[in-house]
Image: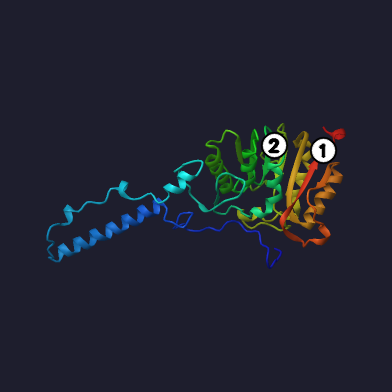
Amino acid sequence: MLAHSALVRVPAVQATAVFGRRGTLAPRQLNECVSVSWIAVRIAVLFCIGCGHEFPSQDASSISAPDSASIPNVDSAENNSRSTTSTRPAPGIVRWAVVPPLKQEVAIMQTVFWEPADTESLRHRIFSTPQIAGSRVLEIGTGSGLVSLCCLQAGADHVVATDVNPNAIQNVRYNTIEACGNLDRLDARLVPRRSPGAWTVIKPDERFDFIISNPPWEDSKPRNVEEFALYDPDFLLLDSIVTGARRRLLPGGRMWLAYGCVTAIRRIELLARQEQLQYLQLDDRSLDELPEVFLPGMLIELTVPAATEP
C-alpha cells in the first residue's frame, strides 16, 4: 500500500447507527428506547409490590403500555421533504450524503467505497452530454451507485451496474428504488471474486453507448472485498477494461474512465495506442505536474475511430 499523508481512498466504515441521518433518533431506535424504559418501570413496580409497598391508586395490573401510535415520528418531516417517502428497512446504511445535482440523498452501506471527489468531472460530463438520454450504459465498479444514479437521472434508457462487493449491489439497488421507485432501468450484477474481470458478467453480445468506470487506482493486492475498490493487482482490471472497449462499445460509443493515479493513466494511454483507440484527456491538468496519486480524479475518454469500428 502506498502511504499518503493527506490522501487516502477508504470504504465507508462499519458503524452502529444510534441516530437518524440528521442527528435525531430514528423511529426504530426511539421505539426501542420507549420499550426498554417501559420494561424498567414494570420491573420497579413489581419489585415494590413484592416488598409490600402500597400504591394509592394503581397496581401493576392496571398499568398499560403506551400506544405505539402516540410515539412521534421524528423522521416524518425529513421523509416528507424527499421525492420518495419509502419506509422500507435499510440494513447496513452507515451514512447519507447530498451530492448535487442529484435530486435525492445517497445512502452508503457498510464496506462500500465512498469518495465523491473521485468522480466530480465524470458526473459533470454525464449531465452535460445530451446523448446520455436514451442510451445504454455500463458502469464497472458501481459502489454506492452514485454514477449510475447520475446516468438514470440524465435520462439513460438502461444501466448495467457491476461490482465485486455484494453490499454494493444491494446499495445501488436501494438507491435506485429510492430515486426511481423501481428497478426497471437498472440491472445490478455481482461479479465473482474468483474472476473479477471487467466483462465477467457481461453477455457476449452486449454492447453499450457508454462504458463508465471509476476503478481502483493502485497496483496492490486486495486483502478483502472492501479493498477491491482500492487496489488493482498488476492493473489487471485496467487492462481488461481498455482491451475490451472495442468489442463492447456500440458505433459512436464512448468509454469514460476516472483515474487519480499517474501510472495508471500513462498505462491507459499506452494500451489505447496498442488497441487503436482514440485517447482524449478531458482535463486541463498536466500529469507531469501531479503527484502519483491525486484528487479529484482525471477523466479519460476512449473511443473507437470510425474507420476501425468492428
Ranked by sequence position, the earlier of labels 1 and 2 is 2
107 relative to 229 in the view: left or right: left
Badge 1: residue crowd in 10 Å (few <14, some 14–19, many ≥20): many
Label disc, if present, on residue 113 of the rendered structure: none
Q: CA distance from mark 1 to mark 2?
A: 18 Å
Write the residue at 43% across / 48% down.
77
Can residue 197 be seen? no
- Residue 52 horizontal side relative to residue 167, left or right: left
Disc number placed over residue 132 in the picture, else none: 2
Residue at image location 12% in from the left, 61% down from the top: 56
SS at mark 2 in the image: helix
From the viewer's perspective, is the residue at label 1 or at label 2 nearer? Answer: 2
Q: Nearer the viewer, residue 99 or 51?
A: 99
Task: Inspect the image, locate mark 1, and give the three-letter code of the amino acid beneath it.
Answer: Val
What's the residue at 36%, 54% (across, down)? 32
Q: Quadrant of the N terminus?
A: bottom right
Q: Which mark is residue 304?
A: 1
- Viewer-side residue, 38 vs 117: 117
The vertical placement of 279 against 131, above or below, is below
Percent position (x, y) of residue 75?
43, 50
Q: Amino acid at mark 2?
A: Ile
| Residue 199: image location, x then y, percent | 70, 41
Circle 1 sits in a helix, a strand or a loop, which is it?
loop
Viewed as shown, does residue 287 lie left or right of 119? right
Residue 95, x across and y down, in percent: 53, 54
- Counting from the top left corner in percent of width and height, residue 263 is at 79, 57
Density class for disc 2 (Cα within 10 Å; few <14, some 14-19, many ≥20) is many
